[in-house]
Amino acid sequence: MLLGLVKPTDGAAFVLGALSTDVQVRRKIGFLPEDFRFYEWLTPGELLHFHGRLCGVSASQLRERIPRLLELVGLTPHRDKRLSEFSKGMLQRAGLAQALVHEPELIFLDEPTSGLDPMGRRLVRDVIRAQRDRGATVFLNSHLLSEVEITCDEVAFIKDGEVIARRDLRHSPQDEIRVVVRGKNFSPQLTTGLKQWATSVDTGGEQITLTTKSLDTLPEILRHIVASGANVYEFRPERLSLEDLFVRIMGEDRGL
């Protein structure tokens, strides 16, 4: 909808302060779809020239910009090949370059690392960070939560078309710390007392799992456990991954 590819059933979409249907606004947007289709008889340089001219970039600017972009995405050695000879990962890199050819203010990337090997995924992450440092906003859509966790500054969880939660990954990358305590004798007073520092406390067998929002609380938690008389065999803080947060926020959906 923001790109004008699908019409909303109601209301209007605004991008960069203007209606998403505004042609001038679209010239400021870069887009890499997940299921891309490029003209296979073109070389990567010809692809970038074609898309660059569509976006209003001058021929002289493209002469300087295209070699730099091909180098950025690692396609310089393949600049004379036709896209029909490219692997999916190479096409993904070419698609990333075309999304950047006009130096957009806003970049939409849909599953940009889905067809890439580990080195390719690292390259995409580096490119995204460089665009952020340039001042652009990168809108990344992905089900690979590990990539989101490494790359993004902020994350939003969408369910049934609604944003139900947001997280700032710059200041609280995994939001909470999980502490796993193993021992032999946990009293009710012990678990009750832990609630002054913990947002949740779960007991099962010889293990207590609790979550807290700050590492600063860990010394107090450990002192409380020892003072209660429990024999601590293991005290292991773990940061919750984005996947853990996703399951907690979204809930277990067996229908997906």
Image (tube, rainbow, N blue to C red):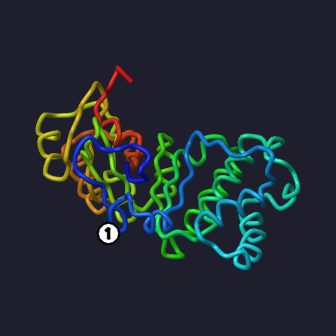
Quadrant containing the C terminus is top left
Give 251 or 105, whichever is nearer the viewer.
105
Give 35 or 123, whichever is nearer the viewer.
35
Q: Position of residue 208 (x, y in %)?
A: 28, 36
- Can residue 209 be spotted in the picture? no
The quadrant holding residue 66 is bottom right
The quadrant holding residue 191 is top left
Residue that appears at 21% across and 34% down: 186
Residue that appears at 48% across and 70% down: 105
Taking the image as shown, residue 238 lies to the left or right of residue 217, namely: right
Give 16 or 232, whichever is nearer the viewer.
16
Q: Position of residue 147 (x, y in %)?
A: 53, 49
Taking the image as shown, residue 107 lies to the left or right of residue 199, namely: right
Residue that appears at 58% across and 39% down: 35
Secondary structure of the residue carrying numbered label 1: loop
The quadrant holding residue 89 is top right
Amino acid type for the residue under numbered disc 1: Gly
> Which residue lies under the disc numbered 1?
17
Instruction: Name above or below for residue 124 compared with residue 207.
Output: below
Instruction: Check disc 1: other Cα within 10 Å, few if <14, some if 14-19, many if 20+.
Output: few
Q: Position of residue 17 (x, y in %)?
A: 32, 69
Tag count? 1
Taking the image as shown, residue 219 lies to the left or right of residue 141, namely: left
Q: Position of residue 38 (x, y in %)?
A: 68, 46
- Can residue 40 be spotted in the picture? yes
